[in-house]
Image (tube, rainbow, N blue to C red):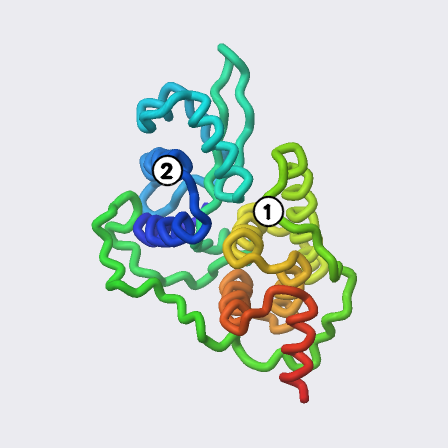
Amino acid sequence: MPIVNYVREHIRFMEYACDEKLTSSERLLWYALMHIMNQRAQGNVWPDEFIRISNERLLSLCPMKFDTMANARNGLKQRGLIEIEKGEKNKKSPAYRMIYFYPMYASPSTERDGYDGYTENSDNMGGNMGYNMGGNMGYNMGGNAGGNPGDFNINNNYGLNPTPYRNREEDDETSIVSHSRARVRQAWIDAYGREPNPSIVSAIMQRGLNVLHFDLGVVCEAISMTALRNADSPLDYIFRLFRDWDYRKIKTVSDLEAYLEGEEA
Protein backbone atom coordinates (compact mmCIF):
# COMPACT_ATOMS: atom_id res chain seq x y z
CA MET A 1 0.00 0.00 0.00
CA PRO A 2 1.51 3.35 -1.00
CA ILE A 3 2.17 6.36 1.18
CA VAL A 4 0.75 9.32 -0.72
CA ASN A 5 1.12 13.05 -0.11
CA TYR A 6 -2.19 14.65 -1.07
CA VAL A 7 -0.73 18.10 -1.70
CA ARG A 8 2.24 16.86 -3.70
CA GLU A 9 -0.04 14.85 -5.98
CA HIS A 10 -2.23 17.88 -6.67
CA ILE A 11 0.72 20.17 -7.37
CA ARG A 12 2.23 17.69 -9.82
CA PHE A 13 -1.12 17.07 -11.48
CA MET A 14 -1.68 20.79 -12.01
CA GLU A 15 1.69 21.00 -13.78
CA TYR A 16 1.00 17.84 -15.79
CA ALA A 17 -2.49 19.01 -16.79
CA CYS A 18 -1.07 22.30 -18.01
CA ASP A 19 1.80 20.70 -19.92
CA GLU A 20 -0.38 18.03 -21.53
CA LYS A 21 -3.39 20.32 -22.09
CA LEU A 22 -5.93 18.17 -20.28
CA THR A 23 -9.56 19.14 -20.79
CA SER A 24 -11.54 20.73 -17.97
CA SER A 25 -13.63 17.57 -17.67
CA GLU A 26 -10.52 15.38 -17.37
CA ARG A 27 -9.19 17.64 -14.63
CA LEU A 28 -12.46 17.69 -12.73
CA LEU A 29 -12.82 13.91 -12.90
CA TRP A 30 -9.27 13.40 -11.62
CA TYR A 31 -9.98 15.71 -8.67
CA ALA A 32 -13.17 13.80 -7.92
CA LEU A 33 -11.41 10.45 -7.98
CA MET A 34 -8.61 11.76 -5.76
CA HIS A 35 -11.23 13.06 -3.34
CA ILE A 36 -12.80 9.61 -3.11
CA MET A 37 -9.43 7.87 -2.72
CA ASN A 38 -8.54 10.37 -0.01
CA GLN A 39 -11.71 9.41 1.84
CA ARG A 40 -10.63 5.76 1.67
CA ALA A 41 -7.11 6.50 2.93
CA GLN A 42 -6.05 5.39 6.40
CA GLY A 43 -3.73 8.05 7.70
CA ASN A 44 -1.11 8.56 5.00
CA VAL A 45 -1.64 5.09 3.48
CA TRP A 46 -3.79 5.29 0.39
CA PRO A 47 -5.68 2.58 -1.52
CA ASP A 48 -3.78 0.94 -4.34
CA GLU A 49 -6.48 -1.51 -5.36
CA PHE A 50 -9.51 -1.06 -7.61
CA ILE A 51 -12.34 0.83 -5.90
CA ARG A 52 -15.91 0.51 -7.18
CA ILE A 53 -17.54 3.90 -7.66
CA SER A 54 -21.02 4.40 -9.04
CA ASN A 55 -21.59 6.73 -11.96
CA GLU A 56 -24.11 8.59 -9.83
CA ARG A 57 -21.46 9.28 -7.20
CA LEU A 58 -18.98 10.64 -9.74
CA LEU A 59 -21.63 12.74 -11.48
CA SER A 60 -22.61 14.23 -8.13
CA LEU A 61 -19.00 15.44 -7.79
CA CYS A 62 -18.57 16.36 -11.45
CA PRO A 63 -21.28 18.64 -12.90
CA MET A 64 -21.25 17.20 -16.40
CA LYS A 65 -23.22 14.85 -18.62
CA PHE A 66 -22.51 11.13 -18.50
CA ASP A 67 -21.05 11.06 -22.04
CA THR A 68 -18.69 13.89 -21.11
CA MET A 69 -17.60 12.00 -18.01
CA ALA A 70 -17.09 8.82 -20.02
CA ASN A 71 -14.85 10.69 -22.47
CA ALA A 72 -12.90 12.23 -19.60
CA ARG A 73 -12.51 8.82 -17.98
CA ASN A 74 -11.15 7.36 -21.20
CA GLY A 75 -8.77 10.30 -21.55
CA LEU A 76 -7.33 9.77 -18.07
CA LYS A 77 -6.96 6.07 -18.80
CA GLN A 78 -5.10 6.67 -22.06
CA ARG A 79 -2.75 9.05 -20.29
CA GLY A 80 -1.94 6.37 -17.71
CA LEU A 81 -3.37 8.32 -14.79
CA ILE A 82 -6.02 5.74 -13.89
CA GLU A 83 -6.93 2.14 -14.58
CA ILE A 84 -10.55 1.03 -15.04
CA GLU A 85 -12.51 -2.18 -14.70
CA LYS A 86 -15.86 -2.01 -16.47
CA GLY A 87 -19.00 -2.54 -14.46
CA GLU A 88 -22.20 -4.41 -15.32
CA LYS A 89 -25.45 -2.56 -15.85
CA ASN A 90 -27.71 -2.78 -12.81
CA LYS A 91 -25.29 -5.24 -11.17
CA LYS A 92 -22.01 -3.59 -10.23
CA SER A 93 -20.36 -0.21 -10.66
CA PRO A 94 -17.13 0.43 -12.57
CA ALA A 95 -13.93 0.12 -10.56
CA TYR A 96 -11.11 2.68 -10.60
CA ARG A 97 -7.46 2.50 -9.60
CA MET A 98 -5.37 5.66 -9.26
CA ILE A 99 -1.83 5.75 -10.62
CA TYR A 100 -0.16 8.20 -8.26
CA PHE A 101 2.70 10.46 -9.37
CA TYR A 102 4.80 10.11 -6.21
CA PRO A 103 3.85 6.93 -4.34
CA MET A 104 6.19 5.98 -1.52
CA TYR A 105 6.27 2.33 -0.58
CA ALA A 106 6.99 1.28 2.97
CA SER A 107 8.59 -2.13 2.72
CA PRO A 108 6.22 -4.96 3.66
CA SER A 109 7.52 -7.62 6.03
CA THR A 110 7.65 -10.22 3.30
CA GLU A 111 9.54 -8.26 0.63
CA ARG A 112 12.02 -5.43 0.15
CA ASP A 113 10.61 -4.10 -3.09
CA GLY A 114 9.97 -0.56 -2.00
CA TYR A 115 10.86 2.29 0.32
CA ASP A 116 12.37 0.37 3.23
CA GLY A 117 13.46 3.47 5.08
CA TYR A 118 10.88 6.03 4.09
CA THR A 119 11.10 8.86 6.59
CA GLU A 120 9.01 11.74 5.25
CA ASN A 121 7.11 13.51 8.01
CA SER A 122 3.64 11.99 7.91
CA ASP A 123 2.07 14.02 10.72
CA ASN A 124 -1.39 15.08 9.59
CA MET A 125 -0.46 14.17 6.03
CA GLY A 126 -2.99 11.58 4.89
CA GLY A 127 -6.25 13.17 3.86
CA ASN A 128 -5.15 16.63 4.96
CA MET A 129 -4.64 19.37 2.40
CA GLY A 130 -3.13 21.60 5.07
CA TYR A 131 0.13 19.69 5.12
CA ASN A 132 3.00 22.17 4.77
CA MET A 133 5.41 21.12 2.07
CA GLY A 134 7.56 24.19 2.60
CA GLY A 135 7.37 24.98 -1.08
CA ASN A 136 9.84 22.24 -1.85
CA MET A 137 8.80 19.10 -3.64
CA GLY A 138 12.08 17.49 -2.73
CA TYR A 139 13.25 16.64 -6.22
CA ASN A 140 16.43 18.14 -7.58
CA MET A 141 16.20 17.70 -11.30
CA GLY A 142 19.89 18.37 -11.62
CA GLY A 143 20.83 15.86 -8.97
CA ASN A 144 23.29 13.07 -9.20
CA ALA A 145 21.87 9.63 -9.90
CA GLY A 146 24.31 8.04 -7.51
CA GLY A 147 27.63 7.68 -9.24
CA ASN A 148 29.17 6.41 -12.42
CA PRO A 149 27.34 3.39 -13.84
CA GLY A 150 30.79 1.96 -14.49
CA ASP A 151 30.95 -1.30 -16.45
CA PHE A 152 27.24 -1.60 -16.94
CA ASN A 153 26.46 -3.29 -20.26
CA ILE A 154 23.50 -1.74 -22.00
CA ASN A 155 23.34 -4.28 -24.82
CA ASN A 156 20.57 -6.54 -23.60
CA ASN A 157 17.29 -7.85 -24.92
CA TYR A 158 14.93 -5.22 -23.58
CA GLY A 159 14.50 -3.77 -27.04
CA LEU A 160 15.96 -0.77 -28.78
CA ASN A 161 12.74 0.16 -30.57
CA PRO A 162 9.97 0.11 -27.97
CA THR A 163 6.38 0.73 -28.91
CA PRO A 164 5.23 4.25 -28.05
CA TYR A 165 3.33 4.25 -24.79
CA ARG A 166 0.79 6.98 -25.34
CA ASN A 167 -1.67 8.43 -27.83
CA ARG A 168 -3.30 5.24 -29.11
CA GLU A 169 -6.92 4.26 -29.70
CA GLU A 170 -8.59 2.66 -26.69
CA ASP A 171 -8.43 -0.91 -28.05
CA ASP A 172 -4.73 -0.59 -28.79
CA GLU A 173 -4.06 1.17 -25.49
CA THR A 174 -4.93 -1.88 -23.42
CA SER A 175 -2.53 -4.01 -25.45
CA ILE A 176 0.26 -1.43 -25.26
CA VAL A 177 -0.09 -0.96 -21.51
CA SER A 178 -0.20 -4.72 -20.98
CA HIS A 179 2.91 -5.16 -23.11
CA SER A 180 4.73 -2.40 -21.25
CA ARG A 181 3.72 -3.82 -17.88
CA ALA A 182 4.93 -7.28 -18.91
CA ARG A 183 8.30 -5.90 -20.06
CA VAL A 184 8.84 -3.92 -16.85
CA ARG A 185 7.79 -6.94 -14.77
CA GLN A 186 10.19 -9.21 -16.67
CA ALA A 187 13.01 -6.69 -16.31
CA TRP A 188 12.51 -6.78 -12.53
CA ILE A 189 12.44 -10.59 -12.48
CA ASP A 190 15.63 -10.74 -14.57
CA ALA A 191 17.33 -8.25 -12.28
CA TYR A 192 16.17 -9.50 -8.87
CA GLY A 193 15.10 -13.08 -9.47
CA ARG A 194 11.63 -12.55 -7.99
CA GLU A 195 8.22 -11.18 -8.83
CA PRO A 196 7.80 -7.43 -8.28
CA ASN A 197 4.97 -5.93 -6.32
CA PRO A 198 2.36 -4.86 -8.94
CA SER A 199 2.18 -1.40 -7.40
CA ILE A 200 5.94 -1.02 -7.90
CA VAL A 201 5.53 -1.84 -11.58
CA SER A 202 2.73 0.73 -11.87
CA ALA A 203 4.84 3.40 -10.16
CA ILE A 204 7.80 2.78 -12.48
CA MET A 205 5.57 2.86 -15.56
CA GLN A 206 3.77 6.02 -14.47
CA ARG A 207 6.95 7.96 -13.75
CA GLY A 208 9.16 6.65 -16.53
CA LEU A 209 6.72 6.22 -19.40
CA ASN A 210 3.82 8.56 -18.82
CA VAL A 211 5.38 11.49 -16.94
CA LEU A 212 8.96 11.60 -18.27
CA HIS A 213 8.28 9.90 -21.63
CA PHE A 214 11.28 7.58 -21.64
CA ASP A 215 11.45 4.75 -24.13
CA LEU A 216 10.50 1.44 -22.57
CA GLY A 217 14.05 0.16 -23.04
CA VAL A 218 15.39 3.04 -20.93
CA VAL A 219 12.98 2.20 -18.12
CA CYS A 220 14.11 -1.44 -18.15
CA GLU A 221 17.75 -0.38 -18.13
CA ALA A 222 17.14 1.67 -14.99
CA ILE A 223 15.85 -1.46 -13.25
CA SER A 224 18.89 -3.49 -14.30
CA MET A 225 21.32 -0.77 -13.30
CA THR A 226 19.67 -0.43 -9.90
CA ALA A 227 20.00 -4.16 -9.26
CA LEU A 228 23.67 -4.08 -10.25
CA ARG A 229 24.19 -1.26 -7.75
CA ASN A 230 22.45 -3.35 -5.07
CA ALA A 231 20.51 -0.28 -3.96
CA ASP A 232 18.88 -0.56 -0.55
CA SER A 233 15.72 1.16 -1.79
CA PRO A 234 15.31 0.07 -5.44
CA LEU A 235 12.37 2.29 -6.33
CA ASP A 236 14.09 5.33 -4.83
CA TYR A 237 17.26 4.64 -6.82
CA ILE A 238 15.31 4.06 -10.03
CA PHE A 239 13.60 7.42 -9.60
CA ARG A 240 16.97 9.07 -8.94
CA LEU A 241 18.21 7.66 -12.26
CA PHE A 242 15.06 8.92 -13.96
CA ARG A 243 15.58 12.43 -12.61
CA ASP A 244 19.21 12.48 -13.65
CA TRP A 245 18.49 11.16 -17.13
CA ASP A 246 15.59 13.55 -17.63
CA TYR A 247 17.86 16.45 -16.60
CA ARG A 248 20.40 15.29 -19.19
CA LYS A 249 17.61 15.00 -21.80
CA ILE A 250 18.08 11.27 -22.18
CA LYS A 251 14.92 9.71 -23.65
CA THR A 252 15.98 6.82 -25.88
CA VAL A 253 18.27 3.84 -25.51
CA SER A 254 20.64 5.45 -28.02
CA ASP A 255 20.77 8.58 -25.85
CA LEU A 256 21.59 6.44 -22.83
CA GLU A 257 24.28 4.48 -24.67
CA ALA A 258 25.98 7.71 -25.74
CA TYR A 259 25.81 9.08 -22.19
CA LEU A 260 27.27 5.94 -20.62
CA GLU A 261 30.03 5.77 -23.21
CA GLY A 262 30.93 9.36 -22.36
CA GLU A 263 31.04 8.47 -18.65
CA GLU A 264 33.41 5.58 -19.32
CA ALA A 265 35.74 7.59 -21.58
Is 82 drawn above or below residue 155 in the view shown?
Answer: above
Q: Residue 124 placed where, x, y %?
A: 24, 50
Q: Position of residue 250 (x, y in %)?
A: 59, 69
Q: Residue at x 36, y 66 (%)?
A: 138
Horizontal arrangement in the rendering, residue 171 relative to residue 71 (left or right)? right
Tag 2: residue type? Ser
Badge 2, how many Cα within 10 Å: few under 14, some, many 20+?
A: few
x 59%, y 60%: residue: 214
In this view of the protein, which residue sits in the foreground, 156 or 252?
A: 252
> Element at badge 2?
helix
Residue 180 in view in this figure? yes
In which quadrant of the rendered image does the C terminus lie? Answer: bottom right
Q: Is residue 72 above or below residue 17?
A: above
Picture disc at residue 166: 1
Between 144 and 78, the residue placed more toward the observer is 78
Identify which amino acid the numbered label 1 is placed on: Arg
What residue is at 38 percent from the left and 39 percent from the top?
A: 27
Q: Position of residue 133 (x, y in %)?
A: 27, 60
One can see residue 40 in this view: no
Q: Nearer the viewer, mark 2 or mark 1?
A: 2
State which quadrant residue 209 falls in.
bottom right
The label on residue 251 is: none
Residue at horizontal 46%, vertical 22%? 67
Q: Position of residue 72 (x, y in %)?
A: 45, 33
Q: Residue furthest bottom?
A: 265
Q: Mark 2 vs mark 1: which is more N-terminal?
A: 2
The residue singled out by tag 2 in the image is 24
Report the side of 60 relative to 255 (left or right).
Answer: left
Q: CA distance from mark 2 to mark 1?
A: 20 Å
Looking at this view, name the residue that lies furthest to the top. Answer: 90
Location of residue 41 (image quadrant): top left
Mark 1: which secondary structure?
A: loop
